[in-house]
């Protein structure tokens, strides 16, 4: 085991993981994130096994040496996209850091992969944003995917604190209109029926699955064949979605009734019954709706 590697890493061989997906009789779109997924041992072999029958997306910062092997052995037609995170200031601190990143983008594009360079619009980057986009385009990068910053900077919360000029600059270059919606709209999925748990699930590297990123309750273990998927859409009972993109994609417009919400709260927060009476929960729900 490598120093500082999680003990659960490499617990299951690539072929076993792929077979777990195969035996569901579904064709999956598997979104692989990290940390940095290319640091996992046998990661390229895992992707080879998965892409025999399924589609994958990989989120990476293109900082490892094995990505070139990935580009040479993985069928690009089975890869929906590569999300290449660009941390421009960090890249510029490393000798040839930015040029190596761009060369890797070109390599993947030449092999037929759709590479989306993910550029998070951190407030202090605005003075250089347009110059960076132009530079990347001139270097042959085909897709620069702007993502709005969500969080606090200098005691101001974003994306709501973007100025009108900053908003217009994002709007000018953004690829995904959902990013503009994140600035313009306030999303709340509480009480709405959500298909997370039916159409998707969240899984860690040991195979433990949850309904979504925000849920804390286990639905079993995917690699041990001891899991269950939902068969009906269930109400969202979270005031803040841990992954806003999941909410946008899977939450429906249909509202759940109070009883459905109450039952889901009891499932997601089993310890709450010791702290609060059912009547208080009911009135809290009624006020929220």
Image: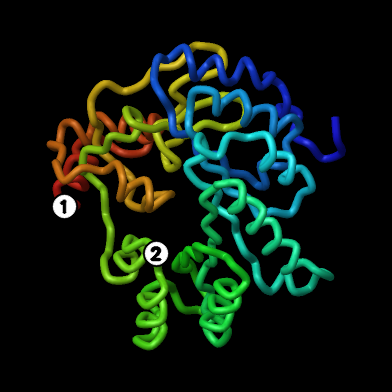
Q: Position of residue 150 (x, y in %)?
A: 46, 65
Camera sees residue 154? no
Q: Position of residue 78 (x, y in %)?
A: 51, 34
Q: Position of residue 175 (x, y in %)?
A: 39, 64
Q: Is residue 107 above or below residue 201?
A: below
Q: Is residue 97 left or right of residue 50?
A: right
Depth order, front residue of 78/13: 78
Q: Residue at x 64, y 17 (%)?
A: 15
Q: Is residue 50 above or below residue 115?
A: above
Characterize the local packing of mark 2: few (<14), some (14-19) or many (20 or more) Cα atoms within 10 angstroms: some
Depth order, front residue of 15/154: 15
Q: Residue at x 55, y 15 (%)?
A: 19
Circle 1 — which element? helix
Q: Which residue is mark 2?
A: 175
Q: Position of residue 259 (x, y in %)?
A: 16, 31
Circle 2 — which element? loop
The quarter of the rendered structure image containing the N terminus is top right
Q: Is residue 162 above or below residue 87?
A: below
Q: Which residue is mark 1?
A: 287
In the image, which disc is placed on residue 81? none
């Amino acid at each position: 085991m490598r120093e500082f590697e999680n003990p659960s890493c490499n617990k299951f061989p690539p072929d076993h993981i792929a077979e777990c997906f195969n035996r569901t009789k579904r064709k999956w779109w598997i979104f692989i994130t990290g940390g940095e997924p290319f640091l996992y041992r046998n990661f390229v072999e895992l992707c080879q096994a998965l892409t025999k029958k399924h589609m994958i997306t990989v989120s990476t910062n293109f900082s490892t040496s094995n990505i070139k092997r990935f580009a040479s052995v993985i069928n690009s037609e089975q890869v929906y996209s590569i999300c290449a995170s660009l941390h421009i200031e960090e890249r510029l601190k490393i000798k040839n850091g930015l040029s190596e990143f761009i060369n890797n983008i070109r390599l993947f594009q030449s092999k037929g992969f759709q590479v989306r360079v993910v550029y998070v619009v951190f407030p202090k980057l605005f003075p250089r944003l347009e110059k960076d986009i132009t530079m990347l385009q001139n270097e042959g990068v085909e897709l620069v995917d702007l993502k709005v910053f969500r969080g606090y900077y200098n005691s101001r919360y974003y994306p709501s604190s973007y100025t009108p000029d900053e908003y217009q600059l994002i709007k000018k270059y953004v690829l995904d209109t959902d990013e503009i919606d994140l600035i313009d709209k306030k999303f709340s999925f509480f009480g709405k029926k959500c298909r997370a748990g039916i159409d998707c699930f969240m899984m860690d590297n040991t195979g433990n699955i949850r309904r979504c990123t925000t849920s804390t309750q286990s639905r079993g273990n995917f690699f041990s064949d001891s899991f269950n998927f939902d068969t009906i859409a269930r109400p969202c009972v979270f005031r803040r979605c841990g992954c806003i993109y999941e909410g946008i994609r899977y939450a429906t417009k249909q509202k759940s009734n109070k009883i459905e919400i109450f039952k889901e709260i009891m499932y997601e927060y089993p310890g709450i019954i010791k702290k609060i009476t059912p009547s208080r929960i009911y009135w809290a729900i009624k006020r929220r709706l």
